[in-house]
Image (cartoon, rainbow, N blue to C red):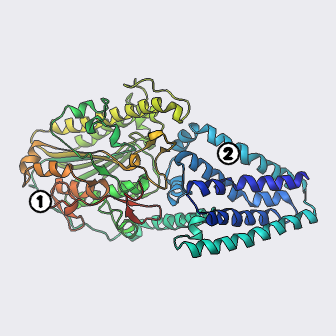
Amino acid sequence: MAKRLLIIYTLLILLIPNVALCFTEGMSTVASLCNILLPGAFILFILTISRRIGVNIWLLFPYFFFSAFQLVLLKLYGRSIIAVDMFLNLVTTNAGEVTELLSNLLPIVGLVFILYLPVLVAGGIMWHRHIEISPSGQKTFRRVATLCLIAGLFSLGIAVLGDDKHDPKDDIFPLNVCYNVYLAIERTAKTASYHETSGDFTYGAVPTHPSDSTEIYIAIIGETSRAGNWQLFGYGRPTTPLLSMRDDLFAGGNTMSESNTTHKSVPMLLSPVSAKDFDKEIYRTKSLVTAFKEAGFKTAFISNQRYNHSFIDFFAEEADTTVFIKELGLETDINLPEDLKLLPVMDSIMGQGGNKQLIVLHTYGSHFNYRDRYAGTTGTFLPDDYTEADRDNRDRLINSYDNTITVTDRLIAGCIERIETMKGALGGVIYTSDHGEDIFDDGKSNFLHASPLPTIHQVHVPFVIWLSPALKDLMPYDTDTLRKNMARKISSSASYTPTLLMMAGIRTAKADSTKSLLSPDYREEEPVYLNDHNECVPLKGLL
């Protein structure tokens, strides 16, 4: 009897995600039946593939893993299956980030362990002791599995015939997850071949500014910063006091990112690639760093993140000088909030000379765990301590998050001030964030970013530009053009690189001038989004 109960219990706990997805994904009745009966049949067949129960349970280990992963995902985002980007995040996210996240999700992680670990332990014990189910019990469960299979196939037929959008590889868990694993492996292989596929890429970049001028451009890539928490864009708290005091900034408050994942958003920001051509072009396109090098600039890429073996690393390696301060331990030498430790490294590089320089700063910004982003200082907004990331702690989480924005404010202001000291230099600072963040907004349970379906908080990002007086004087048009364009709809993903190249007077056919915010020909479009299968879709339909 105990053996049969273990099989039934295993079946039920493995089907929890299937049942939950029927509700979260709004499935029809027949689609729901299909999503429960077919996986249920599969589980029962595996549980009775031999009479040794322990062996059968451990054959289902991938199912246990996917089920646990899916439950954590539903806790974080409230809906959707495990996405391709989720698996890619596993290989492009450093262990420190994972530890920070899991340590603040203890309730759901604990529940997953309580549900699944005892079964795996029991299976291991039974395997070791060669415990078997009776032949009659095996036959009984196989009959039930057969009936579930027949009913499931029948419901699948009805679902497919009744809805031309129903696709088993998208709508049946864990078949959909297995398909996404395949896509993740395929993309990883293509990424690994990047150096070969992009080897002959060139911008054909031509400089247009005077060759004897001193030029310096600082391109800042923010992390997890949402525009809604910036004082500069109307937020009711002084989160950007230094930038808000300036009257020479150009700020785009209606800016959307085309991805809510770092490993796709940052490559789009640093190249002419956008959601419209990402899957086709990203594997054969180099970053704007190469364009600046072709135009005669000395280049540097300074990162406060760690290596993640993705396009970000590849783009960083294009620079003449590449520094990942965490990898070298440089961030431990200075008692400053994390991102401000980039400034002394930048000062050193600026001091090494070169009358034309590009410096890219890749920050850690407002990435969770928020308190770690301003460690060593007292936050402006208190209390900012929290033990768990949940809705009950939202006020403290917001306080802590807002404190991270004040660090970004200091970083951008510091970059501007450094160029201001270089009298007569052509220069500029351009900032945007890769994506935003959910922090239990609107009474919902959504938290963090990179959810399979974005929310407005995950894609609405800040965009800030500063130009030196000398650069303003050199420009062949009035800066009213830039101010006008910054008030329009902006895609940070599509506009960052064309704007920076035009700012530096670099001409190339690879960049679309109608996407440059400095161009009188700037053309705004309705926001789009690069979905999990790398398809460009209207953002409006997802929010």
Label 1 sits on residue: 208
Question: Nearest the camera: 397 or 422?
Answer: 397
Q: Is residue 375 above or below residue 265?
A: above
Query: Can the viewer see residue 128?
Result: no
Of discs 1 and 2, which sits in the foreground? 2
Instruction: Choose between 471 and 418: the one closer to the eye.
Output: 471
Is 191 placed left or right of 409 in the picture? right
Give SS at disc 2: helix
What x and y, as percent, mark residue 131? 90, 56
Tell me the amino acid under the disc marked 2: Val
How would you rate the neighbour count of disc 1 (Cα within 10 Å): few for under 14, some for 14-19, many for 20 or more?
few
Q: Residue at x 72, y 46 (%)?
A: 115
Q: Quadrant of residue 14?
A: bottom right
Spatial separation of the CA atoms under disc 1 and disc 2:
59 Å
Snapshot quadrant of residue 76: top right
Mark 2 neighbour class, 10 Å CA radius: few under 14, some 14 to 19, many 20 or more: some
Location of mark 2 (residue) = 112
- Whether the residues at callouts 1 and 2 have beta carbons within 8 Å, the answer is no
Residue visible at 73% across and 62% down in the picture: 40
Q: Position of residue 125 (x, y in %)?
A: 85, 50
Q: Secondary structure at mark 1?
A: loop
Position of residue 386 measured from the top left corner of the image (x, y, whole percent): 52, 29
